[in-house]
Image: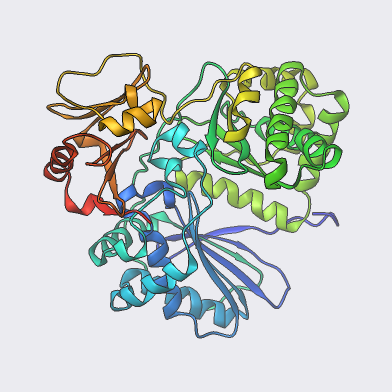
Amino acid sequence: MSNGETLQHRVLEVDGVQVHHFPSAAPVCSAALLFGVGQRDESLATLGTLHMLEHLVMHEVRHTPISINGSVGPSLTDFTAEGSPGLVRTFLEGVCRGLAAPPLSRLAAEAAVLSAEGPDESGTPLGPARYGLRDLGLVGAPGPGPAGVRAETVRAVAERWFVTGNALLMVDGPWPEGLSLPLPVGPAPTHAYVVPRRWERPHAITVDGPGCGFSVILPPAEGTGLELLTAAVIEHRLTEVVRHERGLTYSLDRELLAVADGRWELTVLAEPLPDRAVEAVLAMIDTTTGLLRDGATEAEVEHARETVLESARGRDSEIASAMDVAIGALLGSDVAAFDAAAVGAVSADRLNDQLRGLAADVLYLIDARAADEVARRGIPTTEIPPGSSASLPAGEVFRPPLPARVADKDARTARVALTETGLAQRLGDQTWTLDWTEVAGVLRDDDGDLTVLASSGVAIAVGPKLYRRGKKLIQAVRRNVGPDLIWDER
């Protein structure tokens, strides 16, 4: 605490839910009811179910004068309130009742509300490149949309995830006397997190538009705050160069998320103006390449250290740090309590060793217009996921129609094989395969053509306009994929 006062923190249990209370003399009570489930715990076919459930519950408790909110993130679903203790208690109890018995009669009306809200645009191809269409690769993925959310799925999700053992409550300020949390009793379910795909050299993924960002996988946290220092150094260098020196973007968004093997994924995204996107991509690549190759300066390391230490000062930061540990335990992540002495002891050499170890596994998100310049820097573009050099497996082979092969050089080498177990596609010198058992979803466009999506991230488009005798491919997909996994492309 900035005034030398020790943060009060008591841990208790209410109706089987672990509660962290941070008492204070403030008249306002702030509360956050957290559940260890997020977008990464859904499937492509059920994506949006958590968001629907959150909306259904919030509709039931909306008549209150206090500030309330609900949200679904990559790893957590939360319900928050701030106001007088009695009204906060009423809100929390109402949320728990709504989760225990979701008001499914409102499903169609809430689907219209969610459609008006628009699709989730927070994801990028960096997610599928690391995880496929599962885990963090589901953030912003093309799910069936609000109209495709089914009542039985909402009920099943509520029963599985919104139980006492998967809940955590934070209360800051006066205690809401008489609080009860009437959730169904049950243990926290197991998460099916995916170990991220690693790369042996930097690669770039192209998007049609002003995309500019990158992803690296940091080593497991070791209790020294090294992952925080690494993120701070990278963010500072990029901010100084890409924003302040070059004026190429207003903001840089940084996210640090725990992944399956105890590591952390650091993602940094910029939002450049469309007419300066190529310049921003090259500046980001050149800046990160230099930093990861040569390391940070002593001044940069000291700035990162001060930034991390300052961010941990004050009551709100201390509460956030304590909750990070509790949330980590809830999600099965090893999050150590913040240790200022350990952060201060990290040397520039240790930090720079970590930076240099990240260089091979950088994955860039780039505007497609920058692909040639990026290639000249020795960074190849890649598909998601990368294909193999293997030949098409045995099966019935389909080719594009002659007009397409005449007009499009890519179509001249395109082949799709219908095999005994799935589909395979060859484009140029690369081959992709998928098994019917790993189909995560099928998108149907306005012409009736289908794009078959595998959990690995492989996508194979089929249909009469794409391949001769393409109706046979359509029939094969419909024969081997259940109707619940096929929806209209939005």
Give the vertical position of 60 relative to 346 (above or below).
below
Whole-percent x, y for residue 391 in the image: 27, 14
Q: Of 72 and 147, which appears nearest the observer? A: 147
Determine which quarter of the picture holds residue 342: top right
In which quadrant will I find the C terminus? bottom left
Counting from the top left corner in percent of width and height, residue 136 is at: 46, 42
Nearer-the-camera pick, 293 or 70? 293
Q: Nearer the viewer, residue 472 or 384?
A: 472
Q: Which x, y percent locates residue 380?
A: 55, 20
User: Which x, y percent locates residue 485?
Assistant: 24, 50
Q: 168 or 55, which lies in front?
A: 55
Question: In the drawing, does residue 306 fall left or right of residue 42?
Answer: right
Compared with 194, 482 (above or below) is below
| Residue 172 appears left or right of 19 | right
In the rendered image, the residue lying farthest to the top is 390
Residue 27 appears in which quarter of the rendering? bottom right
> Where the N terminus falls, by quadrant?
bottom right
Residue 349 visible in the displayed image: yes
Q: Tell me the residue at 34%/52% (across/down).
A: 187
Asked if residue 415 is positioned above or below residue 308 in the image, the reply reads above
Give the residue furthest to the right.
Answer: 299
Q: Quadrant of residue 487?
A: bottom left
Query: Who's the residue at 44% across and 41% down the image?
Result: 137
219 w.r.t. 95: above or below: above
Mark yes or no: residue 43 visible: no
Q: Is residue 105 left or right of residue 345?
A: left
Residue shown at 27% from the left, 30% from the top: 402
Give the colour scheme of this rendering.
rainbow
At x 17%, y 44%, the residue is 481
Instruction: Count the numbered circles shown.
Output: 0
